[in-house]
Each structure stands twice: as structure tokens, then as C-alpha cells.
Image (cartoon, helix red, strand yellow):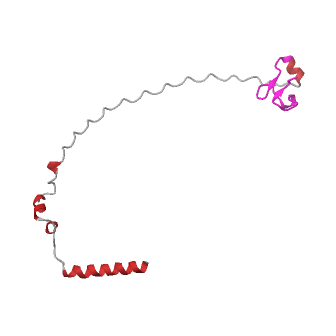
Amino acid sequence: MKLRRLALALLGCASIALAGTTTATASTLADFLPAEVVALIPSGSADSVAPFLPPLPAPLPAPAPQAAPAPAPVPAPAPPVQAKPNRTYKNCAEARNAGVTPIYRGEAGYAAHLDRDNDGIACEN
């Protein structure tokens, strides 16, 4: 199939080359059109179509400059965080006497030795 295409392409190129050398004359589009059609084609400047085009719209005015946005207000500083007293208890009896039981993990006074079952709640009984 490729060989057939190649052979036809070479044959076509050869025929164009042979025909082109014997008939190498300059011709214009008017040579191939009927005289009535040629009479309708304007000759001269390349801008002969311009009278048929609508006029260009007027340019839009430049947008007014916008004022810069006001700067965001500066937030008030956060009040200082008061540190919780880091109280430790020797045992649950001492924590109960202080009135802080049960103590949850993350709270001041929690310690792993006060949480027997390691559920995050110390001195729960």
C-alpha cells in the first residue's frame, strides 16, 4: 500500500514538473473568471472594502482611579494568659482534700501516678 502511494506521488510530481516547464506563463485571477465577474471586482487599493465596513466604535473612557482601601484596623493585643499554678499531689487523698478531684489529663495537677487505669481521669473514685 505504501509503495503504491509512493509511486503515485512520484508520478504526480513528474507530471507537474513536465507540464509546468512547457506552460510557464504568468496569469492572473482575471484570466480564469468570466468578464462580467471581473468587471465587478474593484481594482486599485487594497482598502477598497473599507467603505462597506461599519465605523469603529468610539473608545471607552478610561476608568476613574479607585481610592486605595483603608488599612485594616490593628487588633488589640490579647490579654496575657495567666499561668495556672502547676500543683502536684502526692496521692489522691491530698487532691481530694484540696477539692480538685477528679483531675482530667491536661489539667493542672494531673499526674500519671494518680490515674490507675490510664483513662485520662485521675482520682475518679
Depth check, front residue: 46 or 115: 46
Left/right of residue 18 with respect to residue 104 in the rendered view: left
Residue 122 sits above or below residue 58 on the image:
above
Number of labelled discs?
A: 0
Image location of residue 64, percent across then percent down: 30, 32
Q: Quadrant of residue 54?
A: top left
The residue depicted at 84 percent of the width and 17 percent of the height is 98
The residue range painted magenta reads: 97-125
Left/right of residue 103 with respect to residue 70 in the rendered view: right
Image location of residue 67, percent across then percent down: 36, 29
Query: Is the stretch drawn in magenta largely helix, strand or loop?
Result: loop
**Quadrant, the C terminus:** top right
The residue depicted at 26 percent of the width and 37 percent of the height is 60
Q: Quadrant of residue 86?
A: top right
Q: Quadrant of residue 4?
A: bottom left
Depth check, front residue: 97 or 21: 21
In the rendered image, residue 100 lying in the magenta stretch gets the answer: yes
The residue depicted at 14 percent of the width and 54 percent of the height is 48
